Image (cartoon, helix red, strand yellow):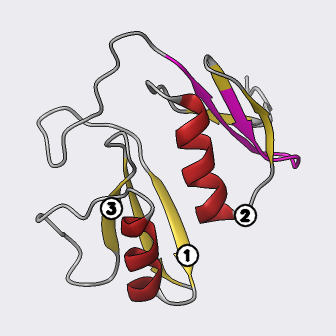
Amino acid sequence: MTVHAELTAIVIDCAAPKELAEFYHHLTGWEITHSDDDYACLGNGPLRLAFPRVADYRGPAWPGSAHHAHLDFQVGDPEATAKELIALGASKPDFQPGDGQWTVLADPEGHPFCISAA
């Protein structure tokens, strides 16, 4: 039996939903559709990003022994985008796999994500 389900949201636990939604708004251009101290959401389309507040949240380590999901984004100019995102609070870990095919960054709460050329 195959279940046919539609993915509607990617939910990213965090300590500061408003601030993280603002960061991803700058990255994606998606509209912030809800934002308060406990929950924020981006996007009006078939897929949204959601950010619930989790008490005592600690972001994942990169690289680390535990495996976590991460997001991949394609951008027109990865180098310029990385600089802009770092100015907005992202960080660039020393460990960069992929021989330059992509750049690993971490959002302001430590969630790793990758950017690559479109």
Q: Nearer the viewer, mark 2 or mark 1?
A: 2
Q: Is residue 74 above or below residue 18?
A: below
- Disc 3 is placed on an element classified as strand
Residue 94 occupies quadrant: bottom left
User: In the image, is 25 to the left or to the right of 80?
Assistant: right
Query: Disc 3 versus disc 2: distance between alpha carbons?
Result: 18 Å
Residue 47 occupies quadrant: top right
Residue 6 occupies quadrant: top right
Dot 3 or dot 2: first in sequence order is: 2
Q: What segment is highlighted magenta in the picture?
A: 40-53
Provide the residue designation for mark 3.
105
Query: Disc 2 versus disc 1: distance between alpha carbons?
Result: 13 Å
Query: Disc 1 versus disc 3: distance between alpha carbons?
Result: 13 Å
User: In the image, is 4 to the left or to the right of 84?
Assistant: right
Residue drawn at x 56%, y 80% is: 75
Provide the residue designation for mark 2.
29
Residue drawn at x 72%, y 64% is: 29
Depth check: 102 or 28 in front? 28
Q: Residues within 10 Å of mark 2 (few under 14, many from 20)?
A: few
Label 2 near label 3: C-beta < 8 Å? no
What kind of residue is marked 1?
A: Gln
Depth check: 53 or 68 in front? 53
Dot 2 or dot 1: first in sequence order is: 2
